[in-house]
Image (cartoon, rainbow, N blue to C red):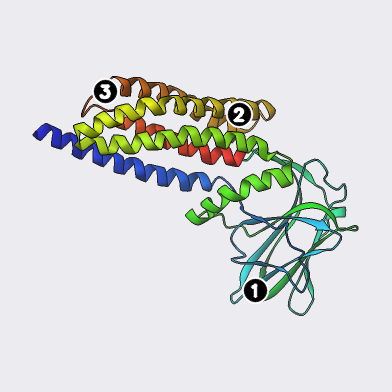
Amino acid sequence: MLIRIINMKLQARNIGLIAGLILVLFLSIGALSAHQPRLDTGTTFSVENPILVENPEISQAFYGQLKGNPVYYQIKSDNPFQLYVNLLVPTSPGQSGEFISAEVTDASGKVIIFLNGTKSTWEQYFEEFGGDYYLKGPEATLQVPAGTYNIKVFNTLNQGKYAIAIGKIETFPANEAITTLFTLPLLKEQFFAKPLSTLFVEFVGIILGLGSLMVLFILMVKSRKSEEMTGLTLKVGATLAPLLWVGTIITTMVWVWVMYNNPLNILGLLNSLILVMILLLTWMVGSKTMKAEFGKLPLISASLLVILWWIFVFLAIAVI
């Protein structure tokens, strides 16, 4: 009895540690993106209706498209701050051949920064973690006093996709990481011509695989205190096993296709290694669960498998 109590305490401590690791890894992975992404394509923005930039020293990337008129951004700050601006162009099908420029003015209308895209050298830039290609254009940094600043993005015809990076301080709090999960798929489709159909199929696999695993994992945790619950877990596990494997196989097939089309993606290669570990652990957890009895469910292995799945999901959204 004493040994069982000690084992239960150790398992609870391990689960708490694993939960902490999930949180730390989730936040750390978010930090891999240099800029917090902002997608602004659904509204017409003008000098009277600019895009408001909050926390201008925090590194943010605003993705937009010129549709016949300049696009305006506005910064209002009660304190002096360091203003950093950089122009980028996503290299994707349908992109305009003319480079963009940007003009930053203060409240009086005086130009304090002018980034001339037509007279600048644009260098090809491969963002290794997200696996996307850009042309990186002019940039400037200026210490400015408190006040209101307007940024005008334009070119001769006011046509084409662009990205403007504002701020240098890289930070990725939990709410930004969650928001990014929903922003990146749209960004991939609209700016890099990566179809949502691929994401959809991948998500079907993830929902089946990770969903089945989470149900099984929760039952395993509850089974530590009850032989009856252990029996239920074994029965449900036998039912969920095919769904878990179907989801894992679908996810693997889509991922092989993604990596075939973008084999130089560093973040993708890391995620491929994680997927191999998922396959091995899925087989291990499944085989141990089939032979398990009360007090001997593979809870630690299942916990590790849950961690790897969540890491894979986040990285997959960033890469596809």
Labelled disc at residue 60: none
N-terminal of the pair, mark 2 or mark 3, is 2
Amino acid type at circle 1 is Lys
Quadrant in the picture for the C terminus? top right
Q: Nearer the viewer, residue 265 or 252?
A: 252
Residue 165 occupies quadrant: bottom right
Amino acid type at image mark 3: Ala
Amino acid type, callout 2: Val
Mark 1 or 3, closer to the camera: 3
CA–CA distance in space, label 2 to label 3: 32 Å
At 77% from the left and 64% from the top, the residue drawn is 44
For the residue labelled by badge 3, is the local secondary structure a helix, a strand or a loop?
loop
- Identified at 38% across, 33% down, the residue is 304
Would you call the spot at circle 3 few (<14 residues within 10 Å), some (14-19), or many (20 or more)?
A: some
Q: Is residue 13 left or right of residue 100?
A: left
Asked if 253 appears above or below 179 in the picture, the reply is: above
Q: Which residue is mark 3?
A: 292
Front position among marks 1 and 2: 2
Image vertical order of residue 40 relative to residue 288, above or below? below
Residue for point 70% across, 38% down:
195
State which quadrant residue 126 falls in: top right
Q: Residue furthest right?
A: 156
Q: Which residue is mark 2?
A: 254
Q: Which is more N-terminal, label 3 or label 1?
A: 1
Tag of residue 76: 1
Judged from this view, the residue extending furthest toward the left is 1
Disc 1/disc 3 C-alpha distance (Å): 62 Å
Expressed as whole percent of the image width and height from the top left, the position of residue 307 reads: 41, 37
- Whether 64 is drawn above or below 191: the answer is below
